Image: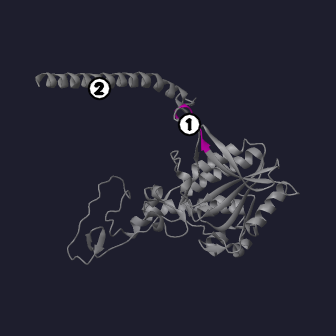
Amino acid sequence: MNSILNFIKYIGKNIWSLIKFTISKMYTVSIVTLAIILPILILSIPTTPTSDGEMIASDTSTLEFSYYSGEKESEDKIARIDISGIILKESLNNDPFSFLNEQAVDANRIKKTLKKLADENDVKAVLLNLDTPGGDPEGAKLITEGILYFKEKTQKPVYGYINSISTSAGAWISAPLDMIIAKDYALVANVGISAGKIVKAPSITKYVGGEFIGESKEEVKIIEMYRGKYKRFENPLNPTDDEIKNVYGDLLDGMYDEFINHMATYRKIDQTVLRDEIGAKVLFAKDALEYKFVDELGNEEFALDTFSKKINSSSDVIILDTNLSSEFGLLESLFGMTKSYVNTKLGNNTIQSSYICNPEQILSFYGNIDNYCK
């Protein structure tokens, strides 16, 4: 009996030794492998020196084209870029699944796409498919910078088509376009700036579970910790009119003046008409035609045919959907991944956690942003 027990102990001890030996060898191999691969991965990241000598990661993204319409064998190409959703200025952080979401537009990536298109000699024009209620005016300015860069570098046109809506920041983007065609009842214009809402509550109510309920006769003191006049409202539940004007007034006035000047410069609309007659109205395209917010009315088929004939009188043009992809290099190659599509859109979860849902964020947006931030 003792012999059997000793034999079992012997076997068990050796098995355990074998397991520990195997684990130690695997660990050693893993460390050695990592030590070899990690420097290679680091060195494989493309870098570019800045003006002060600092090395930064190079842009390895590339343009990807897919057929949308027209003559497939044509050498004359129109690059179509989809701008659908709320306009944001922040980047996607290379989310490979961003193309599944259609709630917002990454303005930085649109600008980058336009700049890369300027180096494509066979692209004869760019077509922006606009379907946006607006968003961040800074994002609109980024896209506008991309439009102007393409136009100035190539001396080629950028067109726009509006199927249903292109208001506020969308109007900002469309202003410098060479031609805009929209369906009769597409919503346009809405030249205005907002900064959320301020609720004044002179009769302080109780704050329970995130909501104000009932009335309280007791004085509630709120002490804000800050330095600098007008940095915060002294009493956020009951700010004075002077505080509201000084905290937001200059910001809104400055951005609104810039918006008005932008529309007047590129769409040739009289500033007095913009301020006093149109204001921040939302107009049907058929009514906005006389104000020059759009150039012609028509459906998508008419728009594509019109733009194509401007490039080639025989309409022998191919229209290609255009997106940006990211080349990741060695790391993905080791794991069988060579390319990941990075679209120009952001998901709803991103919007909910985005700066755009900050009630103090200055927006150029038609509708209620709260519907996107819930």
- Using residue 69 as the reference point, say whether residue 172 is left or right of it: left
Residue 125: give x, y in percent of width and height.
76, 52
Give the image quarter of residue 301. Answer: bottom right
In the picture, the quarter occupied by the N terminus is top left
Residue 35 visible in the shown view = yes
Q: Which quadrant of the figure has residue 133? A: bottom right
Nearest the eye: 70 or 88: 70
Q: Which residue is mark 2?
A: 19
- Mark 1: secondary structure: loop
Extreme residue toward the left, this view: 2
For the question of whether residue 138 can be seen, the reply is no
Residue stretch in magenta? 325-331
Identify residue type, mark 1. Answer: Phe
Query: Could you tell which of marks 1 and 2 lies nearer the N-terminus?
Result: 2
Q: Position of residue 296 (x, y in %)?
A: 76, 68
Query: Seen from this angle, which residue lies furthest right?
Result: 314
Residue at (64%, 58%) from the top-left corner?
Answer: 173
Name which residue type carries label 2: Ile
Q: Which residue is mark 1?
A: 328
